[in-house]
Image (cartoon, coloured by chain):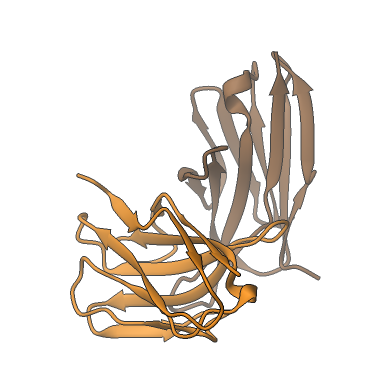
Amino acid sequence: NAGVTQTPKFQVLKTGQSMTLQCAQDMNHEYMSWYRQDPGMGLRLIHYSVGAGITDQGEVPNGYNVSRSTTEDFPLRLLSAAPSQTSVYFCASNPAGGAYEQYFGPGTRLTVT
Amino acid sequence: KNEVEQSPQNLTAQEGEFITINCSYSVGISALHWLQQHPGGGIVSLFMLSSGKKKHGRLIATINIQEKHSSLHITASHPRDSAVYICAVIPYMDSNYQLIWGAGTKLIIKP
C-alpha cells in the first residue's frame, strides 16, 4: 500500500493564482481531512470528508474548496492564492473518525509571493 | 485559552535521559492521540488511548481522564528520537470525531 500520497511536495504561487493540491489514499478509508500547519501553531483543519460525496468545513475553510467524488481522492483547491496561505498542507485519512489511527501524507510546502 | 496545551514547548536533553512530555486538555474527551513529526515533516501515529497506559518499545503513554492530563515518556532517549511530538484529543460530544490539536513539543536529543 502507498498509504496517503500528496502532490506536489513544493509549490510557489503568485498572489491571485489558483491551484489544486492532490491527495489520494489506497486504504479504503472513509474519513479524509486537509490541515494546514503554521509555525508555533497546532494543525488546523481546513475541510474534511466523511465519505464520497460528503464534505464539510473545518476551522479555517476560507479561500479553499474541496470535493470528494471517489473514496480514494480528496483534492484541495486554492481559489485565488494569498500570502496568508503560505503554509505546509497535510492530507490525512482514517477508517471512520478521530477514534482511529490517523494516517498522514508527506505534506506540501506552499509559498505564495 | 487553548483547549489542548502541551508542555514544554521545547526540550533539549542528552542521550540516555528519561524524557517526559505533557498534554493537558480542558474538554471532555473520548480518546487522545500522540503523534510524532519527524524533522523531514512526516507525521506518524504513536498511540491512541482512552485510559491507563500503553507501551511500545521505549515509548510509554499514560492518561488520567479525571485530571484531563496525558504524558508521553521516552526511556533511554536517543538522537533519533529528536522530533516534534503532538497531542490531539477527540471531544466527547463531537459526532464527526474531529480532533483538537496541541501545538507540539519540539524535542532535541544531543549525543
In the picture, which quadrant includes the C terminus of chain A?
A: bottom right
- Choose between B108 and A14: the one closer to the eye: A14
Instruction: Give the colour of chain B.
Output: brown
The residue at the point 59 percent across, 27 percent down is: B81
Taking the image as drawn, is residue A48 in sight? Answer: yes
Residue B91 appears in the figure: no
Q: How many labels does the image show?
A: 0
Determine whether A12 is above or below B42 in the image.
Answer: below
Q: Which residue is drawn at 73% across and 67% down?
A: B26
**Where does residue B86 sit, x and y in percent of width and height?**
61, 49
Q: Looking at this view, is B35 or B64 the one in front? A: B35
Res. A38 image quadrant: bottom right
* Residue A51 image position (x, y, % from top left): 26, 76
Query: Does residue B2 lie above or below B34 as drawn?
Result: below
Quadrant in which the N terminus of chain A is drawn: top left
Report x, y in % for residue A107. 45, 54
Q: Which residue is drawn at 49% across and 71% down?
A: B98
Q: Quadrant of residue A74?
A: bottom left
Which chain: orange?
Answer: A
In this view, B111 is above or below A41: above
Where residue A34 sits, quadrant-wise, is: bottom left
Camera-side residue: A19 or B74? A19
Compared across the picture, whether B47 is left or right of B2 comes to left
- Residue B55 % position (x, y): 51, 30
